[in-house]
Image (spheres, rainbow, N blue to C red):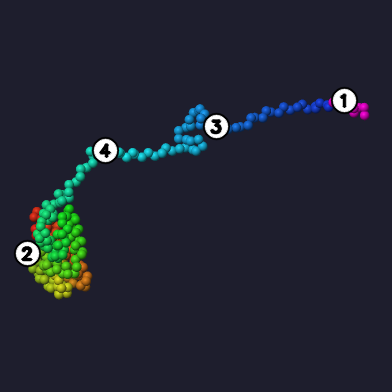
C-alpha cells in the first residue's frame, strides 16, 4: 500500500520510446483567383472568350454601292447591241418591209396553203432567219386536212430539180417514175411530194422512184403524215432560199 502511494506521488514514468516527429502537411491546392473584368491585367488571347472557347470572326460582306458612288468598272460594260432588224440579212429585211400582198405571194410560192402564207405574213417582222423558219415549221404542223390538200394540189408531180435533166438513162427512169406516180395518185388522191435537199443531182431520179414505190405500201392516214412532213421540209428550203436572195420578197427559184 505504501509502495503504491509512493509511485503515484512520483508521477507517471516517461515513455522509453522517443516521440516521432510528424512531417509537415503540404498546403491544399487552390485555383488561382480569377481576375474580375475591372481588375487590371493582360487581356485574354485574341479569338478566345473566358469560359466560352474560341470565337470566330463574323463574316464580312461587300458593302453595296450607294447611288452617288461611281462604278469603277463602268467603262468595261459593253455597249447595247443594235436592234435585231438592223443585223438581219438583206433578203429578210426586204421580206419584213414588203407590203402584205407581195409577202403573201412570195410565201404562196413556198407553200400553196393560203392559211399558212397569211399566218407568216401577219407575224412580220422576224428578227432573224431562224425565227422565220421556226414560225414556218410551226404553221406547217398546224395545217388542217383542207390546208394540206390545198398545198398538195399546188405541187407538181415532177420535182422541180428533175425538170430538164438529160443524164444517161434519165428518160427510162422518168417513164418508170411517171407510171409509179400514176399508181400513187390513184391510191392516195394527191400528188407525190418528197424533199431532195440532201440528195446529189445524179441520184435524184433513182431516189424519187425508190421513195414513191416504197410509200405505195402505206395506208392513207400514214401517208398523209409522211406527205405533210415532206411538204414542210420543202417549204422551209424554199423559204430559206427566198430570204437569202438579194430581192428578198421575190418568188424562190
Give the residue drawn at x 11%, y 61%.
Answer: 104
Residue under pointer 2: 164
For the residues bearing labels 2 and 4, Cβ distance under 8 angstroms: no
Give the residue drawn at x 13%, y 55%.
Answer: 96
User: Distance of mark 2 from mark 4, alpha carbons?
Assistant: 68 Å
User: Distance of mark 4 from mark 3, alpha carbons?
Assistant: 53 Å
What segment is highlighted magenta in the picture?
A: 1-11
From where the camera sits, is residue 66 visible?
A: yes
Q: Is residue 212 left or right of residue 54?
A: left
What percent of the width, then of the height, locates residue 139? 19, 62
Q: Which mark is residue 66?
A: none
Q: Nearer the viewer, mark 2 or mark 1?
A: 1
What percent of the width, then of the height, locates residue 199? 15, 61
What percent of the width, then of the height, locates residue 172? 9, 69
Residue under pointer 4: 71
Q: Nearer the viewer, mark 2 or mark 4?
A: 4
Q: Earlier in the sequence, mark 4 or mark 3?
A: 3
Residue under pointer 1: 9
Q: Residues within 10 Å of mark 3 (few under 14, many from 20)?
A: few
User: Distance of mark 4 from mark 1, alpha carbons?
Assistant: 115 Å
Residue under pointer 3: 34
Q: Secondary structure at mark 4?
A: loop
Q: Earlier in the sequence, mark 2 or mark 4?
A: 4
For the residues bearing labels 4 and 3, Cβ distance under 8 angstroms: no
Q: Nearer the viewer, mark 2 or mark 3?
A: 3
- What's the magenta bit mostly, secondary-structure-wise? helix
Q: Earlier in the sequence, mark 4 or mark 1?
A: 1
Q: Secondary structure at mark 3?
A: loop
User: Distance of mark 3 from mark 1, alpha carbons?
Assistant: 62 Å
What percent of the width, then of the height, locates residue 36? 53, 31
From where the camera sits, is residue 212 visible?
A: no
Q: Residues within 10 Å of mark 1 (few under 14, many from 20)?
A: few
Amino acid at each position: 500500500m505504501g509502495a503504491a502511494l509512493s509511485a503515484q506521488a512520483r508521477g507517471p514514468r516517461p515513455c522509453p520510446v522517443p516521440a516521432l516527429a510528424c512531417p509537415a502537411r503540404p498546403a491544399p491546392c487552390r485555383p488561382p483567383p480569377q481576375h474580375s473584368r475591372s481588375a487590371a491585367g493582360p487581356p485574354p488571347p485574341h479569338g478566345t472568350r473566358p469560359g466560352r472557347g474560341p470565337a470566330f470572326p463574323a463574316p464580312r460582306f461587300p458593302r453595296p454601292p450607294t447611288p452617288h458612288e461611281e462604278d469603277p468598272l463602268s467603262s468595261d460594260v459593253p455597249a447595247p447591241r443594235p436592234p435585231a432588224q438592223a443585223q438581219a440579212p438583206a433578203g429578210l429585211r426586204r421580206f419584213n418591209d414588203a407590203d402584205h400582198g407581195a409577202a403573201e405571194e412570195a410565201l404562196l410560192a413556198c407553200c400553196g396553203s393560203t392559211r399558212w402564207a397569211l399566218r407568216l405574213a401577219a407575224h412580220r417582222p422576224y428578227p432573224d432567219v431562224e425565227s422565220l423558219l421556226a414560225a414556218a415549221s410551226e404553221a406547217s404542223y398546224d395545217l388542217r386536212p383542207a390546208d394540206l390538200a390545198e398545198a398538195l394540189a399546188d405541187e407538181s408531180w415532177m420535182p422541180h430539180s428533175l425538170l430538164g435533166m438529160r443524164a444517161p438513162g434519165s428518160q427510162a427512169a422518168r417513164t418508170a417514175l411517171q407510171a409509179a406516180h400514176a399508181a400513187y395518185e390513184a391510191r392516195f388522191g394527191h400528188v407525190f411530194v418528197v424533199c431532195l435537199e440532201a440528195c446529189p443531182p445524179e441520184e435524184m431520179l433513182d431516189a424519187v422512184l425508190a421513195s414513191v414505190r416504197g410509200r405505195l405500201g402505206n395506208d392513207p392516214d400514214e401517208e398523209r403524215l409522211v406527205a405533210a412532213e415532206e411538204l414542210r421540209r420543202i417549204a422551209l428550203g424554199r423559204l430559206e432560199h427566198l430570204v437569202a436572195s438579194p430581192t428578198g420578197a421575190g418568188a424562190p427559184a
